[in-house]
Image (cartoon, rainbow, N blue to C red):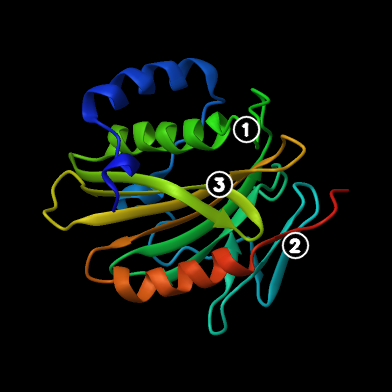
Amino acid sequence: MNKNNKINMATRVGFLVYVFLITTAIPARADICGTYPPSGMDPVYTYQGIYENSAWGYAVAIPKGYKGGLYQDPGAPQHGIMVILSWEPRSTIYFEGEANSQEEESTGKPLGSIGHSIFGLNVIREYASDIKSYEMHKSKLGALSGYEYIVRYTCPGSASVRIDETVVAVSPDESPVYRVTLVTTQNRYKKDHRIFKEIVSKWRQIPRQ
């Protein structure tokens, strides 16, 4: 990893404050420490094959042998679904789209992608007991240019290292913002990372309705 792709801790702290002020609040993510969904919880809906979200304009191929699940209130706006890779230890992949309320630009000024990435770190810090490492670099979400960040951390009451890996990109028309997130353990990471990369590479935009 090139040193230029790593963010100095002092710079990052200052930037976190700035991003907090300009970025739409990201919903609290209880999956960070493996507590959501609760063990054995049945989804409201399940999906196999290709999942299409026409409201936010994206489609994802769910890997063979797995099912995507909607665990939220079916009457609430559906931003995305979760794939459970393992219940114990907990490992999940979540993909979503949301409004780019701050109208960050997708080209030339990639603050939208960077801002959402670093704000994601701030969310993790609310749950984690210790951040072991953080790195960010340019990446692709399907055909879209974006950023990928990888956070290694531990949670209260556990010495097991967990990994949050997210690819985030802004639509060419400046909205929505798209994310695909893997949350897993260090021991499962190599296997789960391959599935994550498969989903990211096959992700695509579709017309919004």
* Residue depicted at x 60% and y 49%: 145
Question: Could you tell me the amino acid type at mark 2?
Answer: Glu
Displayed quadrant of residue 75: top right
Residue 132, numbered circle: none
Residues at discs 2 and 3 in contact (Cβ within 8 Å): no
Residues at discs 3 and 1 in contact (Cβ within 8 Å): no
Tell me which numbered mark, 2 or 3, is placed earlier along the sequence. Answer: 2
Asked if residue 114 shows in the view, the reply is yes
Q: How far apart are marks 2 and 3 (CA)?
A: 21 Å
Q: Distance between the residues labelled 3 and 1?
A: 12 Å
**Position of 144 compared to 87: left or right?**
right
* Residue depicted at x 29% and y 49%: 2
Tell me which numbered mark, 3 or 1, is placed earlier along the sequence. Answer: 1
Residue 52, numbered circle: 2
* Residue depicted at x 72% and y 36%: 175
Name the spot of residue 196 as percent of width and height, x first: 47, 67
**Residue at the disc numbered 3:** 146
Q: Distance between the residues labelled 1 and 2?
A: 29 Å
Displayed quadrant of residue 101: top right
* Residue depicted at x 33% and y 62%: 184
For this rendering, which residue is in front, 43 or 108?
108
Displayed quadrant of residue 103: top right
Residue 108, numbered circle: 1
Name the spot of residue 209 as percent of width and height, x first: 88, 48
